[in-house]
Every structure is written in C-alpha cells, then in structure tokens.
C-alpha cells in the first residue's frame, strides 16, 4: 500500500520510518559536535542507501560556528522558510538549536510521508503564523509521544529545545520495541497532505 512505483522499490514500515528519524538525529548530533550548523536540514536533503542507511547531504548552507556558536549571514538568497526556526526567520540567527527546529519539521515530513510543511500557506504567511505561535499540526496517525518530540524542537526559546544527543536517546528508546507503532500507517490519509513545487512558491523560498 505504501510503495513507490519504481520496480525495485520496497515497502517501508512504521518501524523503518522511526529508524530513519533516529539515524538523522545521530547524523545531526555528529555535525553539531563538530561545531557546524547545517542551515538546510530537510527531508529532501537526506539520502537513503539500499541498506536503508540515511545520509545527510547538501552542505551548501553549512557553516563553521566554532568559537561563536552562531552564524549570521551577510547576504540573502532563496531560503528554506518552512524549515527555519523563528529566530532565523526574524533575526537571521543560525545555531545548532535552529537546526533542532528544522529536525522537528523533518520528523513531521517523515510522519506525513514527505508532505510539504505548511502547504496551505505562502512563505509570508508561514512567517507571520509561526511568529504568532502557530506550529505544524499533529498528524492524526502520529502517536502523542512522537509528536511531543516535534513540539519540543519548536520551542520558542532555543535554549529550551532538546539537544540532538537528547533526541537520539528519546527516539532511540522508541526503536527498541519494533512491535509498537508510533506511526499508524493504516490510518494515513494522503488526501490531507500536499507536495508543493517550486512553481507554487515565491522566488525567495527554497523547497
């Protein structure tokens, strides 16, 4: 039921998706430990090998923050607005904590099998709504436990967000029981989720 049309594609399970989330968290934990900020963490930038090994890619926006713990760009181009933390949207501040926010959006993408975040809103509307406290809504087939991880990543205060090491522990614990479904794929309704294209967005937005 959840299968790509490619002849060599394979089905994925709820447990597979959770494993992907855990692997991405581990990769980001390593990047953070090396004092780099990715700035463009999104599901489109995660490669999946034949052995279902996730590899974080596209480091074109990445910056070394050793000694400063923060990066402020001097110029602007198209930005991944739907994945950006509030402080990045409003003050162009990028930290490991803003990468954590992006990871929360990646979790939401995994839960919705790759839907575009905030698909009902333009990029301008996304900024306004996030500023007012709006966050991505809980997919009805997603467990409360997994959605809580997303919500913690979107905390208004960067210092109150979990570290990637914390997320590794939390999601890692979830993967220990392969029989428990944190994403009830039988209840997934693809009609509720949309994939936007570059033509559907503004020139200042990167999808």
Image (cartoon, rainbow, N blue to C red):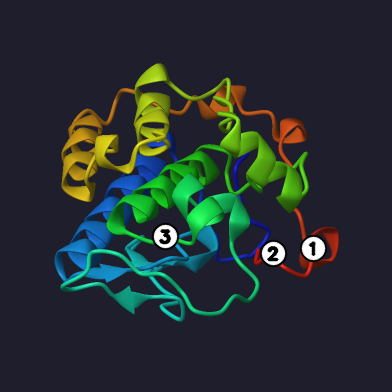
Picture quadrant where residue 36 is located: bottom left
Residue under the point 66% across and 35% down? 129
Give the alpha-carbon distance from disc 1 to disc 3, as whole Å: 22 Å
Residue drawn where x is 46% and y is 50% of the image: 87
Closer to the chain start, of discs 2 and 3, is 3
Residue that mark 1 sits on: 202
- Residue located at (37% from left, 28% from top): 146
Q: Locate residue 174 relative to residue 94 in the image: left or right.
A: left
| Identity of the residue drawn at 78% across and 70% down | 203
Q: Nearer the viewer, residue 91 or 191?
A: 91
Q: Are the residues tagged 1 and 2 within 8 Å (C-beta)?
A: yes
Residue 88 visible, this angle:
yes
Q: In front: mark 2 or mark 3? A: 3
- Helix, strand or loop for disc 1: loop
Residue 147, labelled with which disc?
none
Q: Quadrant of the N terminus?
A: top right
Mark 1–mark 2 Cα distance, whole angstroms, equals: 6 Å
* Image: 132 above or below 145: below
Q: Secondary structure at mark 3?
A: loop
Q: CA distance from mark 2 to mark 3?
A: 17 Å
> What residue did someone put label 3 on?
93
Q: Position of residue 138 (x, y in %)?
A: 54, 24
User: Residue at the right extreme?
Assistant: 199
Residue 165 falls left or right of residue 90 = left
Nearest the eye: 2 or 167: 167
Mark 2 element type:
loop
Q: Give residue 64's quadrant in the image.
A: bottom left
Q: Quadrant of the C terminus?
A: bottom right
Q: Which residue is mark 2?
A: 205
Residue 201 lies, in percent from the top left, at: 79, 60
Residue 72 sits in which quadrant?
A: bottom left
């Amino acid at each position: 039921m959840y299968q790509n049309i490619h002849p060599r594609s394979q089905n994925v399970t709820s447990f597979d998706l959770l494993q992907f989330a855990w692997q991405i968290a581990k990769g980001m934990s390593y990047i953070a430990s090396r004092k780099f900020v990715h700035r463009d963490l999104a599901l489109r930038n995660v490669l999946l090998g034949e052995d279902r090994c996730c590899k974080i890619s596209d480091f074109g926006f990445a910056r070394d923050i050793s000694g400063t713990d923060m990066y402020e760009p001097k110029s602007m181009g198209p930005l991944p607005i739907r994945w950006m933390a509030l402080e990045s949207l409003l003050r162009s501040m990028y930290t490991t904590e803003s990468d954590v926010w992006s990871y929360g959006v990646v979790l939401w993408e995994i839960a919705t099998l790759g839907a575009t975040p905030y698909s009902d809103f333009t990029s301008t509307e996304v900024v306004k709504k996030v500023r007012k406290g709006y966050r991505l809504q809980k997919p009805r087939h997603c467990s409360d436990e997994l959605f809580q991880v997303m919500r913690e990543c979107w905390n208004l205060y960067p210092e109150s967000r979990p570290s990637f090491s914390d997320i590794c522990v939390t999601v890692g614990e979830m993967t220990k029981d392969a029989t428990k479904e944190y994403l009830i794929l039988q209840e997934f309704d693809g009609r509720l989720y949309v994939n936007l294209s570059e033509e559907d967005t503004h020139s200042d937005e990167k999808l």
